[in-house]
Amino acid sequence: MAEQAKRWLQWLVLGALVGAACGAGSAGFLWLLALATDYREAHTEIIFALPGAGLAVGWLYERFGKPIARGTNLVIDTVHEGGPRVPLRMAPMVVLGTVVTHLFGGSAGREGTAVQMGAALADALAHGFHRVSGRLMGRSVDDGGGDRPLRRQLLAAGIAGGFGAVFGTPIAGAVFGLEVVVLGRVEYDALGPALVAAVVGDQVTRGLGIVHTAYPTLHAVSLDPRLGAKWVVVAGAIALVATAFIELTHGIKRVAARSVTWPPLRLAVGGALVVSAWQLLGSTDELGLGIPTIVRAFSDDGLPPWTFAVKLVLTAITLGSGFLGGEVTPLFFIGAALGNLLARVLGIPLELGAGVGMAAMFACASNTPLALSIMAVELLGAAALPHVLIVSALAYVFSGRRSIYPSQRVRPDR
């Protein structure tokens, strides 16, 4: 009983420390991101400098960031395999790289940055706790994170705290931190610290003045057999589009690595392609996060039907060439725009189609249907739950467990 109480106290204290660090870091990151987005929208000519910005970021990572270049996949591998701690410099470098991406018009998200930042801060805390406790107990201190189970739990807490704080969805953040690591299994042993970190991180971020995007609250729609059949069609379409995004992004990474061996030049070429596409399209709607278009998808029955495809290609080029950022918000954009289109074709309420598409697209691409179903409730209201859960689960099955995170493990057969 005393041992259990000690464990819970340890989870509470360390989880709260991880959450506070993630919340403060996410607040600063979101503030910088808002400044960068506002400046780009007011001075669109800066987008022409995206290739030069890519060259600079690529040089910075080539010079100082090789140990952290694998980003979120490095975090997932560290959760599984242990080894040296995640370098603390991952946090400032990924924040800087992501802000530069958005300032100059790259099409990317923010969750990858939040997850990497949270994991780096959490692993630094795990390492520090191990060193202090080791000295107090007279033990030798190695160069890893120490107590491996505790380290895994704190890394999961860092993922949860970063994800929950950056989106304002603490419960979804906690579940995401447990669900994203292994396909088909939720790591419940880390539930305590992950939940504490996500809730504390969200509260700290909000307390520092960050206001998250407000999405429409969905009205309740009865789930009858006819609507259920339509959701099967929607799930199939989402699985196809998510698979296309995954394969195109990974394919661009492979081809770019073979064709342009110097990473800074690789980013410059990717930036030039994005600038060319922007000039061809004559619109900035698909650049950056694209949140205004996501919100628009809930109500605009005149949204161009190709909107989702344009965002898909621009994001694949941006991330595939090596720019920093994440996939969540672009996938929200792709899913909301696709959901808008399918709702019009199938006769589904527009806001419901956009909301389900938004959540299910990322659920499918990241193999996290539980976390995104909860996230839909936190963002859109409880009326979204049955529809999002059904479509997310079906799309997850239809996609064959492909993932934007190659380091995700598949649950071993028992």
Image: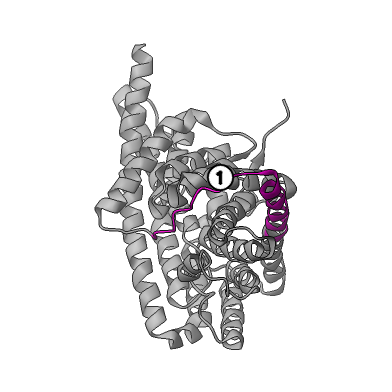
- 22 vs 250, left or right, is left
Could you say which is closer to the camera, residue 254 or residue 333? 333
Indicate the position of residue 368 as horizontal and vertical percent values.
58, 44
- Mark 1 crowdedness (10 Å alpha carbons): few <14, some 14-19, many ≥20: many
Check residue 237 for magenta coloring: yes
Indicate the position of residue 335 as horizontal and vertical percent values. 59, 60
Q: Nearer the viewer, residue 53 or 334?
A: 334
The residue where tag 1 is placed is 76
Q: As drawn, is 160 to the left or to the right of 132?
A: right
Image quarter where the N terminus lies is top left
Q: Is residue 372 left or right of residue 210?
A: right
Q: Quadrant of residue 160?
A: top left
Please give the name of the residue rendered at 69% of the width and 60% of the height, measured from the top-left corner. 346
Residue 173 visible from this viewpoint = yes
Magenta residues (range): 213-241
Question: How far from the left and from the top, in percent, is residue 323?
Answer: 54, 68
Q: Is residue 163 visible?
A: no
Q: Is residue 249 magenta?
A: no
Query: Secondary structure under badge 1?
Result: helix
The image shows residue 354 at horizontal and vertical percentages of 56, 60
Q: Which corner quadrant of the image does residue 89 belong to?
A: bottom left
- The image's colouring method is one colour
Q: Is residue 293 above or below residue 162?
A: below
